[in-house]
Structure formats: structure tokens, C-alpha cells
Image (cartoon, rainbow, N blue to C red):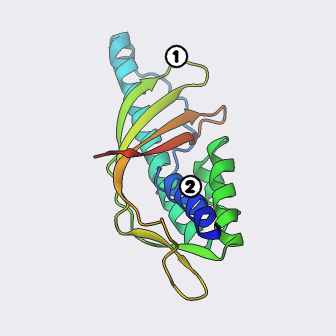
Amino acid sequence: MRARQLSRWAAGLVAVACTTTACGGAQEAATPTGADRAKPANAQRNADELAAEKAALAAYSGYLAASRTASRRSDPQHPELTQFLADPLLTRVRFSLRQARDNGAVSAGTIRSDPVVTSVNLDTKPPSVEIQDCVDATGYRMVYVSDDRVVPGTRGSRHLATATATRYPDGRWLISAGAAHQDQPC
């Protein structure tokens, strides 16, 4: 029974950690130059979408890095988490990290990621960017701190992951939602 419970929380942590290096900081409002004013509206829209894509991917990369660092110590209060994550995902990640810590487990190994933006929605309130990733967590696992034994059911896989980056009023792009689709190999 205990092994099944451990497998459930560990699989949840692997899923959360596998879902998302630098944060998309607040963007300064640029004053248009004469050349910029001459650009068609579509060119400006494309530039805004490209900037959103870049900031969202940076937030996603930061989320993955912060999650990996926090899970190596099962630290739900790791300060970088709030630099890249927002609720409801932040709460889910912290909950999984707390469960791992309470069960004496930490992460080990590596995760490879290859994210792409699938949609940019600048007209929604708040603006958002959807990201799809092929996560290779085959070299990732949870281990018990006491003896480095692998926690049953925590060997990673190569699967699809999705995430949503949202732009907040202060201009930061944060990852607010994410899911690991372990039933969809990539």
C-alpha cells in the first residue's frame, strides 16, 4: 500500500517537474520612431507576437530549471519558483515538492526539453502563449535520500508536455498551467 502511495506522489512530481533560464522581465514601452510609424499594423503585431514567444519560452526554460533545482532538494520554498511560476501551477509544484520531502525523496538525473510555441493569444485578458514540449525524462528519477534507492514508479519517459505562459500586469511572463501527457510519447 505504501509503495503505491509513494508511486502516485512521485509520478505526480515527475509529471509536474517535466512540464517547463531567464525570466521575461517587464518590457519597456518603446516610443515609435519614424520608421516604426511607417510599418503596417501587421508588422507591429508580428513583432509583438515574436516578443511574446521569446518571453514565454524564456519563462518556460526558467520554470524547468527552477523546478529541477528545487526538486533536487525537495524544497517547496525554493525562491526561483516564484520568478517563473504562477498559480495554479505554482501551488501544484510546491505540493508535489512537499510530498517528496515528507517521504524522504529527491530528484536525480537529467531532463531534456525541446519546447515550441503553438499559439500566441495577445487579445485575451490576460495575454497568453501555449507551449508544447517533447520532454525526455528517461534519465530522471526520484531517489530516497537515506540510501539512494530509486522510488518505485518514478523512472521517467519521453512524452508530450504542454504549458501556458501568461503575461501579468507587471509585464512578466509566468508559467501558470502545465501538464505532462505521459500517455503520448514523442
Picture disc at residue 12: 2
Cβ atoms at labels 2 and 1 below 8 Å apart:
no
Looking at the image, which residue is at 61% across and 87% down?
146
> Of the residues shown, which amino acid type is indicated by label 2?
Gly
Residue marked by disc 1:
123
The answer to whether residue 158 of the structure is visible from this angle is: yes
Looking at the image, which residue is at 44% across and 52% down?
61
The local crowd at label 1, few if under 14, some if 14 to 19, many if 20 or more residues have their Cα within 10 Å, is few
Residue 80, percent from left and from top: 61, 60
The answer to whether residue 66 of the structure is visible from this angle is: no
Picture disc at residue 93: none
Residue at far bottom of view: 147
Looking at the image, which residue is at 64% across and 63% down?
97
Mark in the foreground, 2 or 1: 2
> Of the residues shown, which amino acid type is indicated by label 1?
Asp
- 152 and 29: which is toward the camera: 152
Looking at the image, which residue is at 51% across and 44% down?
24
Residue 77, compared with residue 47, is above or below; it is: below
Residue 84, percent from left and from top: 57, 50
Residue 59, percent from left and from top: 50, 47
Q: Give the mark, 2 or 1, whose residue is nearer the N terminus.
A: 2
Which of the image's four quarters has the N terminus? bottom right
